Image (spheres, rainbow, N blue to C red):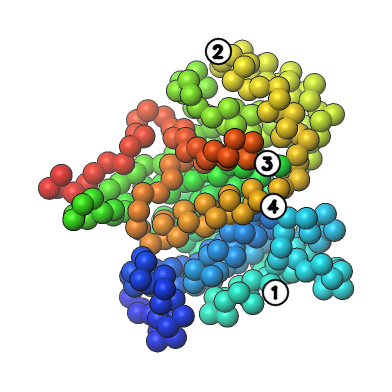
Amino acid sequence: MDGEELTEQETALYDRQIRVWGADAQRRLSKSHILVYGMKGTVAEFCKNIVLAGVGSVTLVDDRVVAEEALSANFLILPDKNQYQGKTLAEVCCDSLKEFNHMVHVSVEKGDISTFGVEFFEKFDTVVISCCSLAKKKLINQKCRKLSKRVAFYTVDCRGSCGEIFVDLQDYKYSKKKLEETIECQLEYPSFEEAISVPWRALPRRVSKLYFAMRVIELFEDVEDRNPGETSIADLPGILKLRKELCETNSLSESQVPDALLERLLIGTREFPPVCAIIGGILGQEVIKAISGKGDPLKNFFFFDAMDGKGLIEDISEPNTGSQAALINDDM
């Protein structure tokens, strides 16, 4: 992403944000390439944010045909049925995103993302996935990690009034300002598989209950061979049984995964537009920070629950990966 300067047109268009995060950060953004899979409401919000911010390109992957229920949370789908009938979610969202910023190249890639070879992901700087099974999340994250260059990896999920973001920046170096100094920092991130493999009993007592609840439902969908979101309140008995098994295995009290929270996640399988806006906004902000190298990045889970209006960052890592940013400035 180094080398080329901003064009005169880019400088004029992005003048306001250049004043906020600087020309170098904007240059990095304008040369970045983002791959996005799973065009739900939260992802639509995220795509809108990064297209307006002025990334170089966005490639969308989602071969599912547009259904009427998608209109409830995805504002990129026009309400006129003639505009989307017979088209895939990626195609419809691509057409709408192009209207937000003509300087960003938005395109569609067809196919099952889990079958794409490792070399396919080398074209991108950031990969964001949603609507993915547990196995698919692990697989795509592994492919990103096999590349010779660092590719930032994110998963995002929104269930009713709750949302979750996972971040893997691998070995990440960045700068931040402290008083009048610029400090160089470094963070080591675990993969998705490594993070969720950390024993529950090894986690701090005050870890978000949403973390445990999302893992229970995610594993239930995996065991039952369900697509993400293909659960309902009718599955509660099976999920409570799985929760009991997981809590016993991990020496964790079942009170850490409340019945009421699981019920809420099962009843609210559709996305809640205000939550989509919040989660999509946070995700957009994190991707911009990671590309620009400016500011403290999120490590490595973010949870939001509209019931209490709180957003929580949780570092779910093995102890040797460290929960704090390491200063790598010799003067410090």
At label 1, the amino acid type is: Asp
Give the numbered dot on residue 273.
Answer: 4
Which comes before the other along the chain, label 4 or label 1?
1
Residue at the location (64% across, 36% down)?
307
Quarter where residue 25 is shown: bottom left
Label 4 and label 1: CA atoms lie apart by 21 Å
Q: Is residue 78 left or right of residue 273?
A: right
Q: Mark 3, mark 1: which one is toward the viewer?
A: 3
Q: Determine whether the residue tagged by mark 4 lies in a helix, strand or loop.
A: helix
The disc, 4 or 2, on the residue closer to the chain's N-terminal end is: 2
Q: Which residue is mark 3?
A: 161
Disc 1 secondary structure class: helix
Secondary structure state at the residue bearing disc 2: loop
Residue found 37% across the figure and 28% down from its top = 319
What's the distance in space between the residues labelled 4 and 2, CA to CA?
37 Å
Sequence order check, earlier mark of 1 and 2: 1
4 or 1: mark nearer the eye: 4
Q: Secondary structure at mark 3?
A: loop
